[in-house]
Amino acid sequence: MIAGLVHTGLTKIYSFASPEQYVTPLSTVVSAFTQFIEDSSLTGQVAECSGKNIYHRSPPEFKDDEAAFIMGDGLQKALQQQGVIVQK
């Protein structure tokens, strides 16, 4: 999930100073999550939320082995080998 500027307690000063068309409503982010829940064909995709729009993209390639291990399936496989996660 990649979201643009959203009204939150942390971004209040930025989001209220920006023109409204450049602020991503929280409802757009919720809609993107709902799409992932309801449509399994989106698994592995990235949802970019920009304003009221949602763009689904393929995730970028990992830049190094460390990122691939943690954010890919390396950590999950290591946990399975240790018996921490039971494979279904």
Image (cartoon, rainbow, N blue to C red):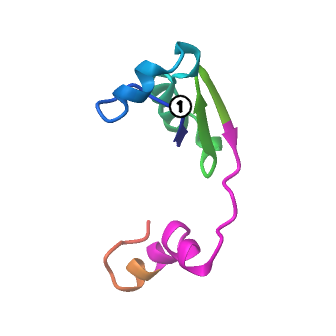
Between 10 and 35, which is closer to the camera in this rendering? 10
Q: Residue at x 66, y 54 (%)?
A: 59
Amino acid beneath label 1: Ala
Residue 55 coordinates in the image, percent (x, y): 67, 33
Q: Secondary structure at mark 1?
A: helix
Left or right position of 31 against 83: right
Is residue 57 in the magenta section?
Answer: yes
The vertical placement of 6 against 48, above or below, is above
Badge 1 local density, few (<14 within 10 Å), some, or many (20+)? Answer: many
Residue 23 coordinates in the image, percent (x, y): 51, 22
The vertical placement of 16 against 39, above or below, is above
Residue holding disc 1? 32
In the picture, the quarter occupied by the C terminus is bottom left
Q: Residue at x 45, y 72 (%)?
A: 76
Between 79 and 67, which is closer to the camera in this rendering? 67
The vertical placement of 86 against 65, above or below, is above
Q: Residue at x 45, y 20 (%)?
A: 17
Between 30 and 23, which is closer to the camera in this rendering? 23
Q: Residue at x 54, y 79 (%)?
A: 66
The image shows a total of numbered marks equal to 1
Left or right position of 88 against 65: left
Among the 4 quarters of the image, the one containing residue 2: top right
Among the 4 quarters of the image, the one containing residue 72: bottom right
The vertical placement of 6 against 78, above or below, is above
Between 85 and 10, which is closer to the camera in this rendering? 10
Residue 70 coordinates in the image, percent (x, y): 48, 72
Is residue 6 in the magenta section?
Answer: no
Left or right position of 68 against 86: right
Q: What segment carries the magenta color? A: 56-77
Residue 82 coordinates in the image, percent (x, y): 35, 85
Residue at the far bottom: name it: 82
